[in-house]
Amino acid sequence: LLVDDERSIRLPGPDVEVVDGSGAGDAFSAGLIAGLLEGWDVERTLRFASVLGASACTKLGCTPGVFDRAEAERFLAAHPLEPVA
């Protein structure tokens, strides 16, 4: 969920099999920072960050499951995250 002076955006979390939630917040934050540094719009940044956070949950430990950029983009192409009301 993102709320600022202009809008409120709620995206569902990606549907992944959760093995271990360790590192999910850090991976989400890394994706958010990457999107900001790339100058992406807010929705693209949130989608990317959400996918990175979810990917961290798919394996045991903080980093083994975290997608690289290409993996995250392939996941998003196959599983688009659309805002919900």
Image (cartoon, grey):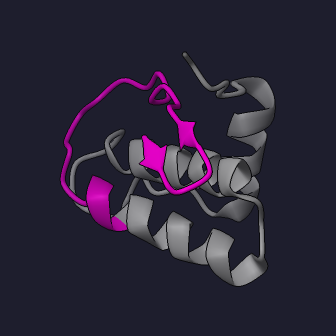
Q: Give the residue drawn at x 76%, y 26%.
A: 78
Give the magenta part as a residue range: 1-26
Q: Give the residue drawn at x 65%, y 28%.
A: 81
User: Quick check: 19 above or below 23?
Assistant: above
| Position in image of residue 71 (x %, y %) | 69, 51
Q: Give the residue drawn at x 54%, y 76%.
A: 33
* In-front residue for pair 61/6: 6
| Position in image of residue 67 (x %, y %) | 56, 55
Residue 34 is left or right of residue 8, and the answer is right
Q: Main secondary structure of the magenta part?
A: loop
| Position in image of residue 4 (x %, y %) | 50, 56
Where on the picture, by quarter, is residue 38?
A: bottom right
User: Quick check: 56 above or below 54?
Assistant: below
Q: Give the residue drawn at x 25%, y 62%.
A: 62
Where on the picture, by quarter, is residue 74?
A: top right
Residue 17 inside the magenta-drawn segment: yes
* In-front residue for pair 26/43: 43
Q: Give the mark count.
A: 0
Where on the picture, by quarter, is residue 59?
A: top left
Residue 36 is left or right of residue 58, and the answer is right
Residue 56 inside the magenta-drawn segment: no
